[in-house]
Amino acid sequence: MDPRFSKFSIGFLCALMLISDASKYLHSKEKSDFSFGAELEASVGNESNVVVEEIDLSTTRGDSFFVVKAKGDIEYAFSSQHSVSAGISYTDKNYFEADRFSLQTTLSSAGYKFKHADYTLSFDYRNASADLGGNDFLTLTHVSPAISFFLDKKNFLRLAYTNIDKELINNPTRDAQSDEIGVDYYYFWNGLSDYFISSVKLRQEDAIDPVFNFSSYQLRLAYKKRYSVSTYKLRLTVEGKYRERDFNDRLNPRINAFRADDRATFSLSNEAEIIDDLFWHVALSYVNNDSNLASASYSETSVASGISYQF
């Protein structure tokens, strides 16, 4: 395992523990305007094909991996309508054999929310940086205003615009700016215990090299359910996505044609609360990316299982 992980993660976990102690103090005060959440997770899994989608790399070789993740977030409501939030997470994914594809990701976020009786306005900022094989790899910055509201007691709608800035450290011709519009529809069949989600996203990405410019749309359907088996509380998620990307600004010199990708993803996960705040989860996913660019055409199956502690 990357020795940088042990140094960073120990410090990160200690910081989370200190923040957790502070949050307990805040929650112990009556009518506190602060809320805090944190999670520690460890899991193992196997992928049938190690892939780096951002640079169209498919190794065609499978490998097992070990993941450790820590995250924390805090929210402060300075009135009944206005609140701000901040969060940070660190994920370390280490392959057993394919070390040069091990990925360390740090995500930070900040947000503002205004709650009206009829709608909610939000503004979110997110920044993600990733190291691949121990080297600087990718930086993403998202800025996203959104509005959400209930159509009635069971139907909920969210509309969002996202501006995306992408920087690939060692591949600057792929650096890009994107504009994305998203619509999410929720149908609460039985409140938060049983509901459906359908989403549409439209995206236009313009890169330094026009051969990487693309327009895309993505459809998503998901079902989430909370239920009990014996004394255990479980959470089930079933999700499917379909995405098309068209690279129509310039012929791709590797295929002497305009590149086109069709991507289908299916995932299934189930989480059980073993004891208070301690969860065991298992997840299965399948990806099929069909492209006329051979290096971007692949399929992948992933299975993972682990435990998490939420506080």
Image: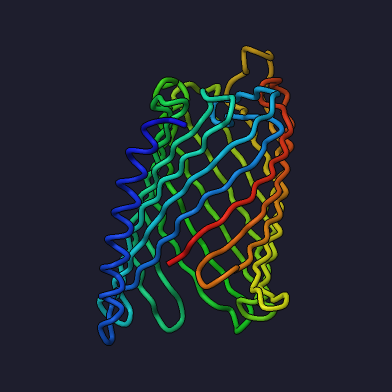
Is residue 189 found left or right of 112 in the rendered image? right
Is residue 242 found left or right of 163 in the rendered image? right
Q: Is 147 or 263 nearer to us in this picture?
A: 263
Q: Is 33 or 61 nearer to us in this picture?
A: 61
Q: Position of residue 164 (x, y in %)?
A: 43, 42
Is residue 258 found left or right of 27 in the rendered image? right
Q: Residue 26 falls in which quadrant of the image?
A: bottom left
Q: Residue 188 falls in which quadrant of the image?
A: bottom right
Please, is residue 231 above or below residue 57 in the view?
below
Please, is residue 266 above or below residue 270 in the view?
above
Q: Is 290 or 92 nearer to us in this picture?
A: 92
Q: Residue at x 39, y 46 (%)?
A: 107
Q: Residue at x 51, y 23 (%)?
A: 100
Q: Position of residue 178 (x, y in %)?
A: 47, 40
Q: Position of residue 110 (x, y in %)?
A: 33, 57
Please, is residue 69 above or below residue 199 in the view?
above
Q: Residue at x 70, y 39 (%)?
A: 263
Q: Residue furthest bottom?
A: 30
